Image: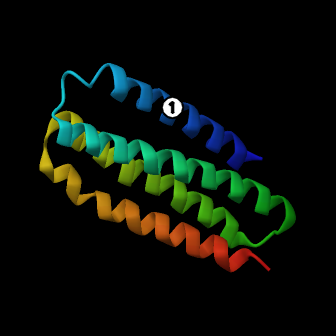
Amino acid sequence: MIWAKIASTLLFIGVGLGAFGAHALKEKLTPYAIDVFKTGVLYHLIHALGLFAVAWISTINNDPRIFWAGIFLTVGIVLFSGSLYLLAVTGIKMFGAVTPLGGLSFLTGWVLLFLTIK
């Protein structure tokens, strides 16, 4: 049940970051930066919920690709959402170059999960 614990932790963090962005950052960031931050939170929460699918499927299927699906979804959250959080808060555009790698990680995780479903 490691994936359920990781999902719960990432959802906790995502909700906290969403609240932080909505309250602490709303007066400090531009509307564009707030939108970037919100996009990071949205993808963070969606893919953390996806980890519950990984947790559930891992209880009914021993395919090793399930483990890798969880890894890729988790890495996607760190790279995609993390880079958007940093871009929004710092304004350093270089962080945006990491975002597509996170997107590719998300896609890889979903394909691997799809392949494990029988």
Q: Secondary structure at mark 1?
A: helix
Q: Pointer 1: what residue?
A: 15
Residue drawn at (77%, 63%) of the image: 57
Query: How far across and down, in percent of the image, does residue 91 sit?
Result: 14, 40
In this picture the colour scheme is rainbow
7 relative to 65, above or below: above
Query: How far across and down, in percent of the image, does residue 108 sit?
Result: 50, 72
Quadrant of the snapshot with the C terminus = bottom right
45 relative to 57, above or below: above
49 relative to 103, above or below: above
67 relative to 63, above or below: above
Residue drawn at (57%, 75%) of the image: 111
Q: Is residue 72 left or right of residue 17?
A: right
Picture quarter containing residue 70? bottom right
Disc 1 marks a residue whose amino acid type is: Val
Extreme residue in the front direction: 31
Query: How far across and down, in percent of the image, does residue 29 sit?
Result: 18, 30
Query: How far across and down, in percent of the image, does residue 50 sit?
Result: 62, 55
Q: Is residue 56 left or right of residue 79?
A: right
Picture quarter containing residue 66? bottom right
Residue drawn at (53%, 51%) of the image: 46
Q: Is residue 53 left or right of residue 15?
A: right
Q: Is residue 65 left or right of residue 88?
A: right
Along the line of sight, the residue nearer the viewer: 44 or 71: 44
Residue drawn at (64%, 53%) of the image: 51
Along the line of sight, the residue nearer the viewer: 20 or 27: 27
Extreme residue in the right direction: 60
Which class describes the residues within 10 Å of circle 1: few (<14), some (14-19), or many (20+)?
A: some
Looking at the image, how many numbered discs can be counted on the residues?
1
